[in-house]
Amino acid sequence: MAIFNQHGKAVANGVLVSDIIHDHLSSQELFVKRKLSFSTREEFLEQLQKVFSPNTKIYSELKNALKENDMEAEKKMRRKAKASKKAVIQHVVEPVKVAQVDSLVEEKGYSLEELKGERNTIVSGLSSEQQELAEATSILEIRKETLKEVQKVFDDAKKALEDANSEVSSAEKAVEASNAKLKDFQSRLAEVDRKIEMEENKSIYLVAPGYTGEVPEHGTFISSVDVKGIANLKVETLGTEIEPNFLDMINAGFDSAQEYARALKFVTLIEYYLCNDMQYNVLVSDSKIQKLISEHIGGQNQHSNIMLDEMDTV
């Protein structure tokens, strides 16, 4: 890839490097000297970047050097314009006299040679002023182009800022909507969990003393005494109890009055739930307690489901 002049001829990369780095040509001077069709430095640099794409270091040096050259050219133009302005001010008096050439000829009798000399002076001043005007116009165009570039950067940044604000606003709305949905799901989940817990705890299990069988995963567990291995067990003590009977104890198979008394308290608990027409399940692993339940509850036990540990069943 190369940069071509107005005649379609490629300009060698080495020539461009020499013009910019060694000769310190400005953009406009380079365009004129090499007959390039670029109107702005940015257009030229855009093409130059493509030419030197394999070597970004050289491109960066050329870009910085060209910018410095343009700045120096502007300074020279400003100094020249300032000097020209002084010359124009000094020359103001002279052109006034030129306008009065005829009267000068008549009044002071200037010769033709003197008039021609005066004319040459005027033509020279006019030419100089035209050149200064061209240079000032060139500076103006450069400034306009710079302003256009800065304005474009500003407009692009402004649009990017507006787009970013719009995206932030959209993201905030999305987060707000997600938070609302999340709260709704959390509320619904808590309500369902509450209902599940209520349903699970609806099942009442009356646990016999010394129960060693399998314990259901959910439910409300109640006994007349503490039972090892069962968490959240409620111990309920009733005011009334079944009257102990020695023969009853022997028939059930108890050889300890203390164990028999504990078992009677549990049977009393079953009777309480039975009399209050409540649904319940009985967890019992001791066959003696099971016999005692059968003896005192018997066929009345219509609201219960007795779960007997098979290992202890006689």
Image (cartoon, helix red, strand yellow):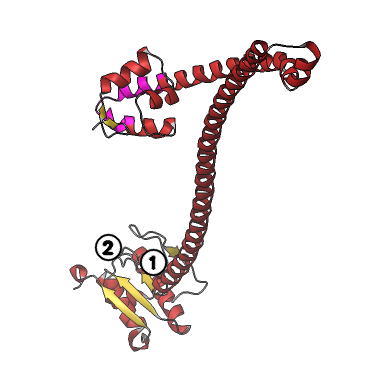
Q: CA distance from mark 2 to mark 1?
A: 16 Å
Three-letter code, disc 1? Arg
Counting the numbered discs, the total is 2
Q: Position of residue 293 (x, y in %)?
A: 33, 78
Mark 2 surroundings within 10 Å by alpha-carbon count, few (fewer than 14), some (14 through 19), many (20 or more): some
**Residue nearest the viewer, comparing 24 with 10:** 10
**The quadrant where residue 213 appears:** bottom left
Residue 255 visible, this angle? yes
Q: Is residue 60 magenta?
A: yes
Q: Is residue 277 above or below residue 205?
A: below
Residue position for label 2:
212
Q: Which circle, 2 or 1, is nearer the viewer?
A: 2
On the image, numbered disc 1 is attached to which residue? Answer: 262
Residue 175's label in the rendered image is: none
Is 91 or 276 nearer to us in this picture?
Answer: 91
Give the amino acid type for the residue marked by disc 2 in the picture: Thr
Q: Residue at x 63, y 15 (%)?
A: 116
Q: Quadrant of residue 47?
A: top left
For the record, the magenta segment spans 48-65
Does the image show residue 247? no
Q: Earlier in the sequence, mark 2 or mark 1?
A: 2
Comparing 221 with 152, the one in front is 152
Residue 208 falls within the magenta-colored stretch:
no
Which quadrant is home to the N terminus? top left
Q: What residue is drawn where x is 55% and y is 34%? A: 144
Q: Secondary structure at mark 2?
A: loop
